[in-house]
Amino acid sequence: MANEPLDNSSNFSLITGILFWCALVVVSCVYLTIPLITIISDVFKVSSSQAAWAGSAFSFAFAGGGLFFGVLSDRYGRKKMMLSGLLLLTVITPLIGSVSSFSWLVALRAFQGLAASMFPPSVLAYAMEMFPIKRRVTIIGFISTAFLMATIVGQIYSSFIVLNFSFSYVFYLLFAVYLISFILIIFFIPKDKTKQPDGSFFSPFLRIGDIFKRKGLPLCYIISATLFISLVGFFTTLGSYLNSSLFGLSHQDILWVRAVGIIGMLVAPFDGRLVAKFGVKNVLWCGLIFAGIGLGLLGLWANLIFLVSMSVVFITGIALALPALISLIGHIAGEIRAIAVSFHMFMVFIGASLGPILSIYLINHGGHLLAFEVLAGLLCLSLIVPFLIRIEE
């Protein structure tokens, strides 16, 4: 199932830019409703815990769908799967803005999550297979940057729209964004040459078990989950901390503090050069160390400038570690990289679902400092994992 890498270097920048943009706008959809919980509660006359299902329904569908559609991309091709996801998003997203029933809102957000889940594993597998080895970690770095930036961009976008328009326009305007993205993929992204596997429709799913037979690969998924438990847990804890009596910041102020973290994400596109020079495991270690230090120091001093600085250090570490981890998974997985990356995305969003639960529990039982330190401790424990993984060149 070998594909021929892209060989026209003049197109690399354009293709990279389009894939970055599409990854950003698709994954931002995961985080749209985080700032909208109160608005959804008011509009649909439901409790805040019920309103949170507008996000949870999407997340669960996104996690499960990513594993399912990542496997299917082996049979139908990466570009076809990306286009299918964007087309469905173009159809489903404006419908969400028009609903008057909360049950329909939750149902359509779940369908939207399934549609969005077609994109991330497919674009990562496409990057691994279609880009030359020397450019592979760089393109993965850009896509990883998009995934990370989406955690903030999605929240800023929906907050800005509801401040200037109504709740429905959050979804109406995304219709145009997804339509444009669909057109860009059709005309500017070369078709991959994935060969249809032998066997029945279900045979690719039987290969999921193969990822647990690759030495070292299951260990990588410990880091996949840990990174996003700590990342989403960090956002949850930070919001609560900044809203406490120590700082008393408003919702919008907190959002802009989070936005500063984008500075740390800008290191991810340079991961390729760092991996080429220092090796994938060394870059992964450095990322985990940076993230652990930044997160561990966060709650030690109640000073806003210090807090913002340590947030940037933490996110820089995550941005270093994530592309290196995806590259390591792809290297170990070989010809089953699409399934391996799909399972990585599944574990990422399991981690993203557990992060807020763990953080809220720790805040309620021990305060913000305990939450920051436990999340940092998880990152430090994950430093052991690369020692146990052997890379065969």
Image (cartoon, helix red, strand yellow):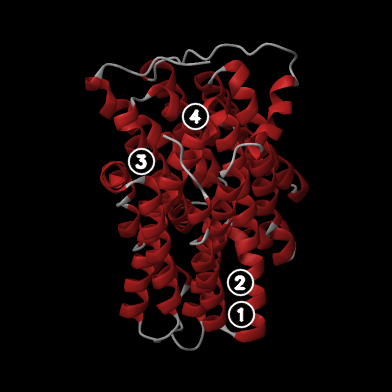
Q: Work out whether mark 2 precedes mark 3 in sequence or the reverse, and give the earlier one.
A: 3
Looking at the rendering, which quadrant does residue 110 occupy? top right
Q: Which residue is mark 4?
A: 125
Asked if the residue under mark 4 is in contact with the one under mark 3, i.e. CB atoms within 8 Å, the reply is: no
Relative vertical location of residue 75 with respect to residue 94 in this rendering, above or below: above
Label 1 – label 4 distance at C-alpha: 38 Å
Label 4 and label 2: CA atoms lie apart by 32 Å
* Viewer-nearest residue: 291 or 164: 291
Q: CA distance from mark 1 to mark 2?
A: 6 Å
Disc 1 residue type (three-letter): Ile
Residue at the extreme left of the image, as rendered: 10
Disc 2 target residue: 359
Q: CA distance from mark 3 to mark 1?
A: 34 Å
Amino acid at circle 4: Ala
**Label 3 is placed on what type of residue?**
Phe
> How busy is the neighbourhood of tag 1: few (under 14 within 10 Å), some, or many (20 plus)?
some
Q: Which residue is mark 1?
A: 363
Residue assigned mark 3? 142
